[in-house]
């Protein structure tokens, strides 16, 4: 299949997908599921400020001769907390990573919490396409979504700060793969005129879930319990993806898997209440562009001759002549002696446009 044929087939696929519906019920369902998947996948990126809230501490100030309760900042860490013994006020403090791992007075350790997460996001964005193109958009989203839920549950067992950094890196990498592959899954079944608005809605999962996480942290005030809640919500979203969404038909088209592509298109058409029965007939019907292309190729072939036999009256010599001259001489001789004409033969697909032919190799009606 050459470049022109591939473009015609891609155009046909787009026309078939329009018959199945590209702005209907199936696309709305996809939007809702991927919106939930996107919001829960970005949980740590959205909730990172809550993870780094410094605690309130109480210490006895001997200079003032009284107990003082105050929220920690780096100036306090450098001065009062170095001089006086302190305890964390759990009633006023919000649950966070910096409190549980006792790193709130270390700028480097606190900073590396976010750095390890977003370093994983960067790596995940580079390798996401490998999985999406190899095993499919849906399978990539599903597999890494299950891994993501397991990682969130794994945070319950972490007691070491370096293990925390490792889990944060893995979380960032996995969630980056999830959101990129799921967005691809949505956009490839969507009408191009709706891509911008649907993508905007997906990106608005960030502020929407941000409000949700704010209330969640305020009410539960236990980051480990919140991780479990998000893991459950994400797991449910993954199940919805498995049962209600199909693999991208464009993925099967690129792999030339027509059977699976037809099954996917039939399911999409059924959800959208569209009539679609036979994929093969649609691909066999030639549109105007294809017919025009084939006719142009046929006309072009008439001037591209690879195997020639000429008539008995053709005068040979040791000099070389161009193909154009051969054809002109042939036509002239053909008019003189109709009974002695030979046939110009065209060899399939081996086209040459302006070759040189040695006359000494041309004999009566045959080429050595």
Image (cartoon, rainbow, N blue to C red):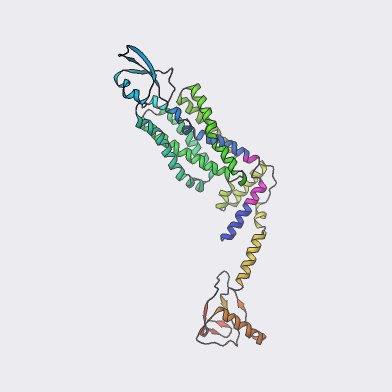
Q: Identify the residue at image location x=56%, y=75%.
A: 306
Q: Identify the residue at image location x=64%, y=55%.
A: 283
173 displayed left or right of 160: right
Residue 23 belongs to magenta span: yes
Spot occupied by residue 143 in the image (x, y as percentages of width and height):
50, 39
Residue 329 versus residue 261 in the image, above or below: below
Residue 310: quadrant of the picture = bottom right
Residue 341 versus residue 4 in the image, above or below: below
Spot occupied by residue 145 in the image (x, y as percentages of width and height):
50, 37
Given residues 165 and 89, the one toward you in this image is 89
Spot occupied by residue 303 in the image (x, y as percentages of width and height):
60, 74
Given residues 142 and 123, the one toward you in this image is 123
Residue 123 belongs to magenta span: no
Of all residues, the one furthest to the left in this rendering is 83
124 displayed left or right of 255: left
Residue 232 versus residue 122 in the image, above or below: above
The kind of secondary structure the magenta stretch mainly shows is helix
Q: Identify the residue at image location x=64%, y=48%.
A: 17
Q: Identify the residue at image location x=63%, y=54%.
A: 12
Magenta residues span 14-27
Residue 78: quadrant of the picture = top left
Question: For the image shown, how many numbered marks are present on the structure?
Answer: 0
The answer to whether any part of residue 241 appears in the image is no
Of all residues, the one furthest to the top in this rendering is 65
Quarter of the image with the N terminus is bottom right
Spot occupied by residue 344 in the image (x, y as percentages of width and height):
61, 78
């Amino acid at each position: 299949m050459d470049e022109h044929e591939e473009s015609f087939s891609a155009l046909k696929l787009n026309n078939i997908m329009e018959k199945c519906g590209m702005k209907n019920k199936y696309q709305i369902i996809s939007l809702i599921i991927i919106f939930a998947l996107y919001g829960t996948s970005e949980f740590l990126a959205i909730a990172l400020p809550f993870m780094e809230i410094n605690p309130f501490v109480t210490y006895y100030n001997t200079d003032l001769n009284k107990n003082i309760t105050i929220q920690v900042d780096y100036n306090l860490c450098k001065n009062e907390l170095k001089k006086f013994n302190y305890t964390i006020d759990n009633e006023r403090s919000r649950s966070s990573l910096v409190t549980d791992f006792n790193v709130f007075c270390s700028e480097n350790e606190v900073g590396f919490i976010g750095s390890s997460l977003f370093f994983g996001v960067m790596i995940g964005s580079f390798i996401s396409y490998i999985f999406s193109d190899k095993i499919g958009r849906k399978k990539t989203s599903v597999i890494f979504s299950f891994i993501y839920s397991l990682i969130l549950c794994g945070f319950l067992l972490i007691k070491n700060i370096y293990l925390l950094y490792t889990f944060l890196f893995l979380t960032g990498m996995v969630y980056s793969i999830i959101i990129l592959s799921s967005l691809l899954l949505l956009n490839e079944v969507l009408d191009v005129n709706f891509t911008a608005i649907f993508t905007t809605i997906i990106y608005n999962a960030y502020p929407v879930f941000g409000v949700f996480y704010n209330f969640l942290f305020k009410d539960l005030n236990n980051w480990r319990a919140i991780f479990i809640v998000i893991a459950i919500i994400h797991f449910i979203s993954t199940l919805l993806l498995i049962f209600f969404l199909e693999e991208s038909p464009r993925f099967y088209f690129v792999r030339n898997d027509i059977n699976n592509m037809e099954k996917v298109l039939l399911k999409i058409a059924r959800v959208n209440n569209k009539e679609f029965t036979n994929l093969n007939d649609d691909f066999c019907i030639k549109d105007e562009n294809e017919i025009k292309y084939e006719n142009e190729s046929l006309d072009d072939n008439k001037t591209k001759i690879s195997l020639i036999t000429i008539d008995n009256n053709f005068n040979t010599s040791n000099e070389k002549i161009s193909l154009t001259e051969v054809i002109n001489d042939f036509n002239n001789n053909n008019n003189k002696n109709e009974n002695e004409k030979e046939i110009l033969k065209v060899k399939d697909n081996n086209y040459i446009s302006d070759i040189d032919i040695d006359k000494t190799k041309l004999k009566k009606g045959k080429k050595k």
